[in-house]
Image: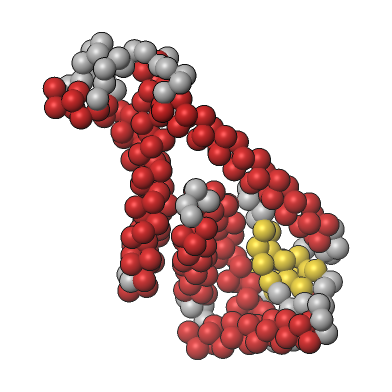
Amino acid sequence: MAITLNLLSIAVLVFAISVVFIAVISPFTLHRIAQFTFGIRKVILWSLVTAPWWIAISCVGFFWPRQQDIFPAALLNDFAHWHHVDIFSFTSWHAVTLLSASAYLLWSVTRTVYIRRKQASSMADLIGLSDIKLQHINGKQGYYSLPLPIPAAFTTGLLSPKIYVTTALKERVNEQELDIIVRHEIAHVESRDPLFKVVFATFAAFFPITATRELIKQFTLLTEQMADSAVTKEYDNLDVAQTLINVARMQRSVDSMHNNMGF
């Protein structure tokens, strides 16, 4: 138990140092990420956001004593400064580090659960307005209709994601544009983007707020671009781009109207 607690305190310290280091270098890395393919960009983003965890786990495995009070090499023993690896003092910096990390983890988990439950409750109330019957376009793509005056389409649900399109959007687009929009959302469903976005955001939450926002922004941009690319297998690139631009303009016009009205 003492060995475990001592090594956990070291892992927490290494984790914190790794977070700071990655937060410092990530702006330079993310600034150049657009030049790579989708697959490489995904690997880079997941590597950055999970690196502190792998480094911390590796640190525990690397420094775990193979024999009592002895590391694999004398150099490692001196480097780690193990004087009494089998003794854990509750008044040492090891204990303070673990206590601080435990308090932060508890606060972070509580905050995340609260936010997710609040979002789930709001989404459940919103989805309660949707039509029970599944809508179809071209006999294939399925989505649910939301009777809302805001032009929007989105996919929600972690394990069983579903597609929702507002009636305001349906009334402003033609059949081809609606098909492009729904295919875009289907690409999100097939890639399980809602689930992976939550997982990615959970890992990113351990970084400073600026780095967290940039990491999530880049991951969201990547998933959107991959969904766009999936639609171009059926439609011309220009048609896909023009449809998405039109939807963005609709949403901006609604936002502008609400701002002018004081909402």
Give the vertical position of 139 relative to 17 (above or below): below
> What residue appears at the point 67 percent right and 67 percent down from the top-left corner?
154
Farthest-out residue, front: 91
Quadrant for the N terminus, please.
top left
Between 97 and 258, which is closer to the camera in this rendering? Answer: 97
Between 56 and 238, which is closer to the camera in this rendering? Answer: 56
Indicate the position of residue 165 as horizontal and vertical percent values. 73, 71
> What residue appears at the point 81 percent right and 77 percent down from the top-left corner?
263
> What residue appears at the point 50 percent right and 88 percent down from the top-left corner?
238
For the question of whether residue 196 can be seen, the reply is no
> What residue appears at the point 36 percent right and 31 percent down from the top-left corner?
10
- Asked if residue 235 lies left or right of residue 146, the reply is left
Between 257 and 234, which is closer to the camera in this rendering? Answer: 257
Indicate the position of residue 58 as horizontal and vertical percent values. 31, 35
Give the vertical position of 56 relative to 223 (above or below): above
Indicate the position of residue 37 as horizontal and vertical percent values. 34, 69
